[in-house]
Image (tube, coloured by chain):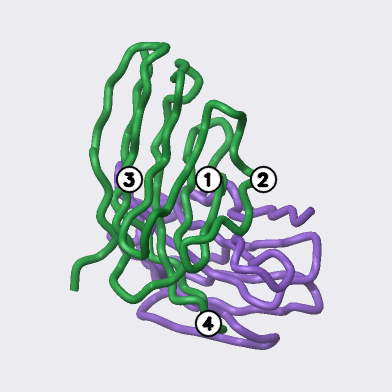
Chain colours: A purple, B green
């Protein structure tokens, strides 16, 4: 059974600072997804990582995937308040469409 | 383009009542997923369909839960009888089954069972 661990679960950071969220998973997975959720809202797709070594960037966020280490990272550069949200990683289980979500990292960016 | 549509957005019911949640996937998508989100258990996949056929229902908590997809543009999740522990936000998501398989989520239905 695929298990997903995100670290940290809570992150409070100052505007302008950099930080990295880590997503470890327990069994082989060939695809990994990152989602954002604002309070009381739905999940918004951020990144789709499809192969080992994949790197995607959008604005101040950059995601990477190391399938050999079973690790994905979400790097935040020069954080701004608008990035405050909960971020979820979700690797796919085996070769299926089934995603297994981590518990999420609640990010708060303070002025 | 319209995204995934769910109804109702909020549902308050009493224990023992039947609850039906509805979902319309994005047009052209051929996979549909039902998730439940709670503070305690996080986001859990309940069941998913591909081309209207249930593929994996291992996440359905018990026999009180059932899901159907009678056609490509409509799915229901039914709880009968409902219990207070079923209170959660239920999300429907859809995707186009291909290598990318990116899932797009609906706005969710917030269910409260009193």
- Percent across and percent down for residue B47 are 55, 49
Q: Earlier in the sequence, mark 4 or mark 2?
A: 2
Identify the secondary structure beneath mark 4.
loop
Identify the disc placed on residue B11: none
Q: Estimate the x, y position of residue B21 in percent, counting from the top left.
A: 34, 39
Q: How many marks?
A: 4
Residue pictured at 47% horizontal, 43% vertical? B67
Q: Earlier in the sequence, mark 2 or mark 1?
A: 1
Task: Identify the residue at the far front of this view.
Answer: B70
| Residue at the spot of label 1 | B43
Q: What is the distance, in whole Å, between disc 2 and disc 1 at their CAs?
A: 14 Å
Of marks 4 and 3, which one's residue comes earlier in the chain? 4
The subunit letter for the residue under badge 2 reads B
User: Based on the displayed image, in which of its 4 quarters is residue A57 positioned?
Assistant: bottom left
Pick the quarter of the image with the C terminus of chain B.
top left
Q: Nearer the viewer, residue B64 or A74?
A: B64
The residue depicted at 47 percent of the width and 40 percent of the height is B37
Label 2 neighbourhood size at 10 Å, few (<14), some (14-19), many (20+)?
A: few
Q: Which residue is mark 2?
A: B58
Quadrant of the image occupied by residue B32: bottom left
Q: Nearer the viewer, residue A111 or B54?
A: B54
As drawn, the label of residue B108 is 3
Q: Which residue is mark 4?
A: B98
Look at the picture and state if A58 lies above or below A10: below
**Circles 4 and 3 on the same subunit:** yes
Q: Nearer the viewer, mark 4 or mark 3?
A: 4
- Which of the two discs, 4 and 1, labels the residue nearer the N terminus? 1
């Amino acid at each position: 059974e695929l298990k997903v661990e995100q670290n940290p679960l809570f992150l409070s950071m100052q505007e302008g600072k950099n930080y990295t969220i880590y997503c470890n998973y327990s069994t082989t997975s060939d695809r990994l997804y990152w989602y954002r959720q604002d309070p009381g809202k739905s999940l918004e797709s951020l990144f789709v990582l499809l192969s080992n070594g994949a790197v995607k960037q959008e604005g101040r966020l950059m995601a990477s995937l190391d399938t050999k280490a079973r690790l994905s990272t979400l790097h935040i550069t020069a954080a701004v308040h608008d990035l405050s949200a909960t971020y979820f990683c979700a690797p796919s289980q085996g070769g299926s469409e089934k995603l297994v979500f981590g518990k999420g990292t609640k990010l708060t960016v303070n002025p | 383009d319209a995204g995934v549509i769910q109804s109702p957005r909020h549902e308050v019911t009493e224990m023992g009542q039947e609850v039906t949640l509805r979902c319309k996937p994005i047009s052209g998508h051929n996979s549909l997923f039902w998730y439940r989100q709670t503070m305690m258990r996080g986001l859990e996949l309940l069941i998913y369909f591909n081309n209207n056929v249930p593929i994996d229902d291992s996440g359905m908590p018990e026999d009180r839960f059932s899901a159907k997809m009678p056609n490509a543009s409509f799915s229901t999740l039914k709880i009968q009888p409902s219990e207070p522990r079923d209170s959660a936000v239920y999300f429907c998501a859809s995707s186009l089954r291909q290598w990318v398989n990116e899932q797009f989520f609906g706005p969710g239905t917030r269910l409260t069972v009193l």
